[in-house]
Each structure stands twice: as structure tokens, then as C-alpha cells.
């Protein structure tokens, strides 16, 4: 039945493309989370009135974050070609998409982390200080746990953005469902291939959103 | 125990310098409950934060149990802070932690082993009366219960000093009283020195031994709670004392008394300390040929004894009146004749 409805779809190729998309998304979400959290914490902690107040450092991090967040992703991929070649050794395949995905998404997530941290009641930080907590204890026992729901909902939004980035990366040779939709679907005029790819991307996005929502709700004790 | 010498804190703002704390000297003894009262903006919040160096003084010295707080290294300061706990107006609990985990927080910071933390948390939950609520999150508690968690958390490290930053200002009157009772209980049981700031004279009256009145960054009056009540010098202190001793309508009431009871004398008696318990009026009626009519009265309990005012009307012939007045003056009750002197 599948073959009558979708005559041009090669299901083994679709499966392979789905795996590539999942691979690119999951690795990039993981690295983006670590890198974005670090950058976001740095942005927050060096801001005026905070633990490591430092105008100079804060300015530099803010500029880096803003620049990479502002460059349209498709252009970022092209700008990063030399960097990617140096790191990965090639411009083709799922691995080659990772540097651009991470560099594009981490600053985006860093801003969300910063906003999440700013939402924390200053009094709680003051209370921890009054108990003699070190700065590291404040970061790991107060800042991160108290902002967890916002950090999780932020990474959910970022992960969904990353799935759509992988589709774009696919167009320039990274593989995955985006590549399939463009090369096999659009270029060869196989509407059924485009449709199947799109539906699969939607399914991935919905699943991420569902997991993210569940996690945020169960973590939020406010 | 706690000694402040010429402590000043100046904030630079766009409108120039603001002297939040202006040359304050204080000496707080071990084991006492010391109250600092003032209206908002008087500098009391800044002052209490200077005690544990959450705010650094611009000049002056703060000594707590022999340590000069502003000269401690960051590490020594963190250790000193474990002995100087603080509770807050808005509790400042970690909402992501349960009651148990919140109370365990300072112990985790202090690096205690898990088994010891568990034992200590159990003791503290009992001490503050939160049995059965250990697994709840702060959002599931009432304001009074949250402050109990705050107090348990503050006591976890067995501190020597407890700083209370408007600890009851966000609570209703009944809950305020139960928290104040708890503070007195731990002060007696643990011999803890308590420094509290408040804008409510009720809090000072109920639990403090000594009080300092702050206005515009300065301590304008200081002393034993009872003597400040008995003899407030500055207008601001008189205002605060009136909050708890006289109902607001007293002035009107007295005017009305004067109209309603033109005969005899209207006398205001002020009882301080043990006197409030004496059967003074009985003696007056028994031994002197006067009629006594009680018009209005209020007795207030403080940590150093009762304090109260009583308005009475005394009627009789001139001789009897003179003798009665002589008696009143002799029993060390403050007597103020309001009408027909």
C-alpha cells in the first residue's frame, strides 16, 4: 500500500536520512547545552552586581554571543567552511554539519540561560552568601537548580530550532531529512518524498516539544 | 559579643551621596535579643547586612566574637558567616528543594557527612514544629511555616548570632506572634544572640531586651526596652512607643473624659516593671476617702516586665485628694494629672 501512495519513496533511504537527522540533532543539542550553559553563566556572573562582576569580560562575551546569534544560519554554514574543514576534514556528511549547528545554536541558548538566571530571586543568592557558600556552591547548588525548569524549556526551544537548522544544513550536503526533501523531493519533482520528509521532521519536533513540556512541568515546584 | 564602632555606609547615587548608615556605635551582649527599629529608609536593612558583611561598611569597625569582620580573608569570612545566620522578610527559601533539603542546605555548604546532616535536620524539624512537613516544597507551605523553615535553616550550623531582617513583616499578626514566641524559645534554649530589625514596636515590646531607634542612618536613642518605653526622649521614639501603649484614639478619649467627668481629677498612671501587678487601686480606695473610677487602661508585657497606662478619675474632698496623690507618688508609679490639677 505504501508503494502505491508513495511510489518514489525509498524507505531504506528515508530511514538512513532520519537517523542522520537524529544524530546531528542529538549531538548538537548536547554540546549546545553544555556550551550555552557555560556562556550563559559567564554572561550572568560577569554582569554588574553579580558574583564575578567584570565589565570588560561581560562586554566581550556579549559581543561574541550577539554576533553569532545574528548571522543567518545558512550564511553561518558558508562562513564556517574553512573552520569545519580544519576540524572535521570534510564539508560533506552529518559530522560536517555539527560545527555550524553548535556555533549557531549555543549563543542563542546562552541568552536564554542568562534570562533564566536573571529570574532567580536575588534574596536566595543573598541567603546562600549569608550561610558562607562559595561562588561554586552558589552556582551548582543555587543558580542551576533554581533555574532548571527555564533551562529545560530553553533547551527544548533550542532543540527544535536545531532540527530545522539540520534541514538547512542538509541542503548544503550534510545529509538527513532536509537533504532528502531537497535533493530527492524538490530537485527531482517527487512531491511524495518531500511530504514524507516533512512529516518525519514534524514528528521529531512534536516529540521533542512533548518531552520538554513534561520535563519542565515535573521539575517546576514553584 | 557584637561591637560596632563609628560604622558608616555611603552609597554613591546619581543624586549624590546617600548616607545609609551614619556613624553608628552599638554594643550587643551575648545572649540578648537586640532590636533595631526605624521606618523604611532609616538604614536598618543596610546596618544588619553590615554585620555579616553582605554590605561592606565605608568606614568603621564591626567586631563579632572578637573577629574584626571587615579584615577577614574571603575564606575566614565564609567560616565566620556560618556562625552568623540570617532570616529574611521574604524567607528566601530554595523553591526547588523540599523542606528537609532546604534545612540541609547550610550543612551541605559546611561539608558535613550525609548521616550527620540527616540527624541534624530531624532535630531541627522538631525544634521549629514542622513534623510531617519535611517532604513538602516551600510553595506548599503557609507564610508562617516558610519562616519556620527559614529559622530551622538558620539554626542548622549552630550559630552564635541570628540576624532577623524584618522576619515577621510579611506575616499576619497571629503568625507573627507564633514566630516571635519561637525566637524567644530558641534564644532561651540555645543562648543565641538575636539581632532583629523591624518597623513594628509590637515586635520590640514582645521579645527584645534592648532597643535602638534609627532615623536617617543614625541611632537616635538606645537602651533597655522598658526604660525606653517609660521615658522616650526623641519624638520618633515617642511615636513608636505610642504604637503599642496607647490606642490611637486616646487623645480624643481624654478630651471626652474631661467633658464627661468634670468633677475630681483625671490622672494618668504609668506602671513600669513589677508595679503593674500591684493592687494599687484597691489600696487607694481602702485607705483614702476617695472614689475611684477607672476610665481606660492598657497593660503591655515586655521581656523586662509589664508596662502599662491607666486613666482614672479620683473624686473626694481636697484633703483626701491631696493624701491620695501623695500615696500614688510614693509607690513609684508615674503620675500625671491631666485635669483639675
Image: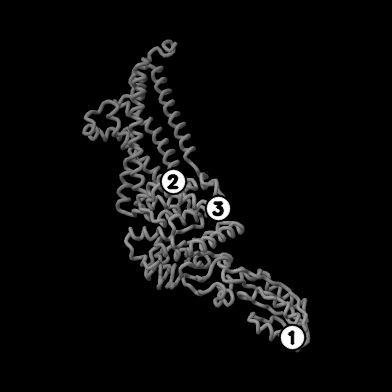
Q: Residues within 10 Å of mark 3 (few under 14, many from 20)?
A: some
Quote the CA–CA distance across marks 2 and 3. Answer: 26 Å
Give the label, 2 or 3, closer to the camera.
3
Q: Is residue A40 above or below residue A1?
A: below
**Marks 2, 1 in one chain:** no
Residue A146, numbered label: 2
Residue that appears at 58% across and 77% down:
B231
Closer to the camera, B208 or A95? B208
Residue A58 spot, x, y in % from top left? 32, 50
**Marks 2, 3 in one chain:** no
Circle 3 chain? B
Residue where numbered disc 1 is placed = B321
Quote the CA–CA distance across marks 2 and 1. Answer: 72 Å
Circle 1 chain? B
Give the label, 2 or 1, closer to the camera.
1
Residue that appears at 30% across and 49% down:
A60
Residue A81 spot, x, y in % from top left? 25, 33
Secondary structure under tag 3 reads loop
Q: Is residue A61 above or below residue B41?
A: above
Amino acid at each position: 500500500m505504501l508503494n502505491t501512495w508513495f511510489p518514489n519513496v525509498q524507505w531504506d533511504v528515508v530511514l538512513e536520512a532520519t537517523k542522520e537527522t537524529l544524530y546531528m540533532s542529538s549531538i548538537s543539542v548536547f554540546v549546545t547545552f553544555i556550551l550555552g550553559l557555560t556562556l550563559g553563566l559567564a554572561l550572568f556572573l560577569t554582569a554588574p552586581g553579580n558574583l564575578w562582576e567584570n565589565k570588560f569580560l561581560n562586554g566581550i562575551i556579549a559581543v561574541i554571543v550577539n554576533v553569532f546569534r545574528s548571522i543567518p544560519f545558512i550564511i553561518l554554514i558558508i562562513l564556517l567552511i574553512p573552520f569545519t574543514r580544519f576540524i572535521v576534514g570534510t564539508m560533506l556528511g552529518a559530522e560536517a554539519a555539527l560545527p555550524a549547528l553548535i556555533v549557531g545554536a549555543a549563543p542563542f541558548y546562552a541568552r536564554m540561560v542568562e534570562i533564566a538566571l536573571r529570574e532567580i530571586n536575588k534574596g536566595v543568592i543573598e541567603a546562600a552568601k549569608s550561610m558562607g557558600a562559595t561562588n561554586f556552591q552558589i552556582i551548582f547548588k543555587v543558580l542551576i537548580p533554581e533555574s532548571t525548569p527555564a533551562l529545560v524549556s530553553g533547551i527544548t526551544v533550542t532543540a527544535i530550532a536545531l532540527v530545522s537548522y539540520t534541514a538547512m544544513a542538509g541542503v548544503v550536503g550534510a545529509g538527513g531529512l532536509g537533504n532528502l526533501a531537497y535533493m530527492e523531493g524538490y530537485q527531482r519533482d517527487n512531491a511524495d518524498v518531500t511530504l514524507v520528509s516533512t512529516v518525519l521532521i514534524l514528528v521529531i519536533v512534536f516529540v521533542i516539544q512533548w518531552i520538554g513540556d513534561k520535563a519542565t512541568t515535573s521539575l517546576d515546584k514553584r | 559579643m557584637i561591637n560596632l564602632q563609628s560604622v558608616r555606609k555611603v552609597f554613591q547615587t546619581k543624586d549624590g551621596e546617600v548616607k545609609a548608615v551614619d556613624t553608628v556605635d552599638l554594643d550587643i551582649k551575648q545572649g540578648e535579643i537586640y532590636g533595631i527599629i526605624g521606618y523604611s529608609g532609616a538604614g536598618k536593612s543596610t546596618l544588619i547586612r553590615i554585620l555579616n558583611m553582605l554590605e561592606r561598611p565605608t568606614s568603621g569597625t564591626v567586631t563579632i566574637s572578637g573577629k574584626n569582620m571587615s579584615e577577614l580573608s574571603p575564606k575566614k569570612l565564609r567560616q565566620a558567616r556560618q556562625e552568623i545566620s540570617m532570616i529574611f522578610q521574604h524567607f528566601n527559601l530554595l523553591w526547588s528543594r523540599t523542606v528537609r533539603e532546604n534545612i540541609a542546605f547550610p550543612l551541605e555548604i559546611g561539608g558535613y557527612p550525609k548521616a550527620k546532616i540527616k540527624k541534624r535536620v530531624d532535630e531541627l524539624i522538631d525544634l521549629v514544629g514542622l513534623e510531617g512537613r519535611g517532604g513538602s516544597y516551600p510553595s506548599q507551605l503557609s507564610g508562617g511555616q516558610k519562616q519556620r523553615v527559614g529559622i530551622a535553616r538558620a539554626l542548622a550550623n549552630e550559630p552564635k548570632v541570628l540576624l532577623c531582617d524584618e522576619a515577621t513583616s510579611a506575616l499576619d499578626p497571629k503568625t507573627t506572634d507564633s514566630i516571635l514566641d519561637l525566637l524567644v524559645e530558641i534564644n532561651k534554649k540555645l543562648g543565641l544572640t538575636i539581632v532583629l530589625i523591624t518597623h513594628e514596636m509590637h515586635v520590640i515590646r514582645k521579645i527584645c531586651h534592648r532597643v535602638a531607634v534609627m532615623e536617617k542612618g543614625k541611632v537616635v536613642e538606645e537602651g533597655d526596652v522598658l526604660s525606653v518605653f517609660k521615658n522616650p526622649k526623641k519624638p520618633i521614639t515617642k511615636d513608636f512607643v505610642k504604637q503599642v501603649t496607647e490606642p490611637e484614639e486616646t487623645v480624643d478619649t481624654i478630651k471626652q473624659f474631661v467633658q464627661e467627668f468634670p468633677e475630681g481629677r483625671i490622672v494618668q498612671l504609668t506602671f513600669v516593671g513589677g508595679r503593674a501587678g500591684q493592687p494599687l487601686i484597691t489600696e487607694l480606695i481602702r485607705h483614702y476617702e476617695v472614689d475611684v473610677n477607672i476610665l481606660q487602661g492598657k497593660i503591655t508585657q515586655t521581656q523586662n516586665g509589664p508596662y502599662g497606662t491607666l486613666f482614672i478619675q479620683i473624686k473626694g474632698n481636697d484633703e483626701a485628694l491631696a493624701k491620695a496623690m501623695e500615696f500614688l507618688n510614693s509607690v513609684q508609679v508615674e503620675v500625671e494629672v491631666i485635669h483639675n490639677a
